[in-house]
Image (cartoon, rainbow, N blue to C red):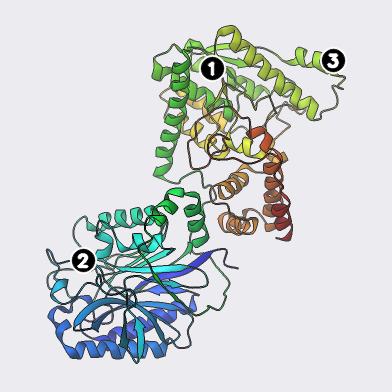
Amino acid sequence: MNHGFVKIAAAIPEVQVAHPKFNLQSVENLIIQAEGRGIEIITLPELCLTGYSCGDLFNQQLLLDEAEMALIQLMNFTRSLDIISIIGMPVAYKGSLLNCAAVLQKGKILGLVPKTFLPNYNEFYEQRWFTSGTDIAADASVWLCGQQVSLSTRLLFATSTCIFGIELCEDLWAPVPPSCALTMAGADIIFNLSASNDLVGKQDYLQQLLRQQSARTHCGYVYAAAGYGESTQDTVFSSKVYIFENGVLLAQGTPHSLEAQMVVSEIDVERLRADRRKNTTFSQCASMNKNHAMQVVETALLNPRDLTLTRTVNPAPFVPVGADLDARCEEVFAIQAEGLAHRLQHIGCTTAIIGISGGLDSTLALLVTVRAFDLLGLDRAGIIGITMPGFGTSDRTHTNAVALMNALNITQREISIAAAVLQHFHDIGQDVNQHDITYENSQARERTQILMDVANKENGLVVGTGDLSELALGWCTYNGDHMSMYGVNAGVPKTLVRHLVKWVALNSSDATTKDILLDIVDTPISPELIPVDEKGEIAQKTEDLVGPYELHDFFLYYVLRWGFRPSKILFLAQAAFGNAYPANILKHWLTNFYRRFFGHQFKRSCMPDGPKVGSVSLSPRGDWRMPSDACRDAWLEECERL
């Protein structure tokens, strides 16, 4: 099962200018290597059979004949191979010469795609030798290598796993590249055969073009440009190889390599199609481009092979790596603070009420509120942080909560919930020694009542602390911590909450605040509703009950952002987490995720306002509209079959 992945390769052969026999051998070596690695489609550079830099030799009939003979040999070479090969070569057509990409499989030429835009400026003189494919009829054909071959800029190639289109080099640099029409017509992947020479700064600009084009058209974009062996008479070609997927660089080659090279990755076509379906602008644009009719060429069926991913699957999809993490934290924190600041300003409120537990979520909410008050120039004394110790409050979290409020110079209050909850237990007939759901939720609702009533008394706004992961799992007490007047963390998953708090700590100029925040980051996640153990330590650890948040955030991302089915999510999880979790453990928590996600939609259907900060949101007014009584059987049944 390929789970929607297509294994592709972009390769740069060794070439000698105007020597098709030598170039053929190099091309064959790369194709047979790719076939052995289970590659479905391989692309090579522009005019790689002859060399791009032949100049006026393109007017020599012998060179054209030698290129055609090389293609015939390549057809024979691929006769028993499944792999689809895309080769650059010159093709004579009706008294003109075309710069073409030839698509081969199992000894047949499936089609020829001529270059649309021919550069004729600066160091380029392509119009001296070649003619644009613009005016060629969509149903044109040419006799080549003993067969009649379709020849058009409007060819799409359909395999059992994807639809792909082709453009050549300068086509990408045009204001409206041909790949726009190709993707609007259904191409999942674009292959670009290129011979882009080297100039200072050009490589960075090229990467920007590739990233933007693949993102704008929601496609996989595979780029292979000529390298060592091309003429260096006036320019240098330095082997540029890139594989992008929807704006993300999956793999790249080694520039300035003196040897042949091949770059391999897997493009997730299912993911691309899911994104297109979700992005209604894409379908609108496609409907406006109906005039770009395409001819679809069916390829031969590929023999199925076991899929081994070479691309990296991030185990924390909400948390970028490296230098991007600081930038992401700063941006998310700014969005949260700006959202709260606008709400406070809109209602003319100068007081905020927050329940401070000493845990990650309430800490982040407090830090966001402090930033919002600072943005508005409000006195931090207007932030009323309330600790509400109960039966499970530990000394560590309580101490951190009090110390943090003091360090941030906000107003601090402490209201114990013990007496009120015991009275409530008496009123409803709850045994205080029975630590069940009633025992836990009574405490959560008492805390929310206190916050709401203090907000009324102080003419303030209750800032919610619950995060995206808790909402996904329903790990919040209905009308308890589920409720607030503005939920600043509602769009932030638990795995990112920890990084945000740590980011604030590491960027804090106050050593005391930094130390407190870092200790909070290291504290086990807990609702603290069950009494502490005999050592005074936290006895109730959330991840022991609902599962590791790193797994649930991973599941959440692929369920909501991409709509993947359980089997694919498990496959990706195994690739992402490796041996950290056995397959049966991943299956257990994935099943648990679906069970809780479907079972707790009613809580999300009436969640408070709060800012969306990333690509995934559960707001019923924004991204996620799901009936509370939707049936989960199909998802759970697939989980059981895994």
Question: For the residue carrying disc 2, how many other residues have a C-alpha within 10 Å: few (<14), some (14-19), or many (20+)?
Answer: many
Outermost residue to the top:
457
Real-space Cα separation, disc 1 to disc 3, in angstroms: 34 Å
**Would residue 330 be found to the left or right of residue 636 on screen?**
left
In screen coordinates, is 340 left or right of 225? right
Residue type at mark 2?
Asn
x, y (%) of residue 143?
31, 88
> Which residue position is annotated with label 1?
405
How many numbered discs?
Answer: 3
Observer-nearest of 410 and 368: 368
Residue 524 occupies quadrant: top right
- In the picture, the disc for residue 197 is 2
Q: CA distance from mark 2 to mark 3?
A: 82 Å
Image x and y of residue 355, in percent:
61, 19
Q: Judge from the rendering whether residue 136 lies leftward or rightward of residue 162; answer left or right.
A: left
Judge the density around disc 1: few (<14), some (14-19), many (≥20) Cα neighbours within 10 Å. Answer: many
First in sequence: mark 2 vs mark 3? 2
From the image, state whether disc 1 or disc 3 is nearer to you: 3
Q: Nearer the viewer, residue 451 or 283?
A: 283
Which of label 2 and label 3 is nearer to you?
3
Find disc 3 in the rendering and name its residue. 427
Are the residues tagged 2 and 3 within 8 Å (C-beta)? no
State the residue at coordinates (53%, 30%): 518
Q: In the image shown, does 141 or 210 lie closer to the viewer?
A: 141
Q: Does residue 474 show up?
A: no
Give me the disc on residue 324: none
Q: Secondary structure at mark 1?
A: helix
Q: Amino acid at mark 3?
A: Asp
Q: CA distance from mark 1 to mark 2?
A: 60 Å
Of the residues under marks 1 and 2, which one precedes in the sequence? Answer: 2
Q: Residues within 10 Å of mark 3 (few under 14, many from 20)?
A: few
Which badge, 1 or 3, comes first in the chain's sequence? 1
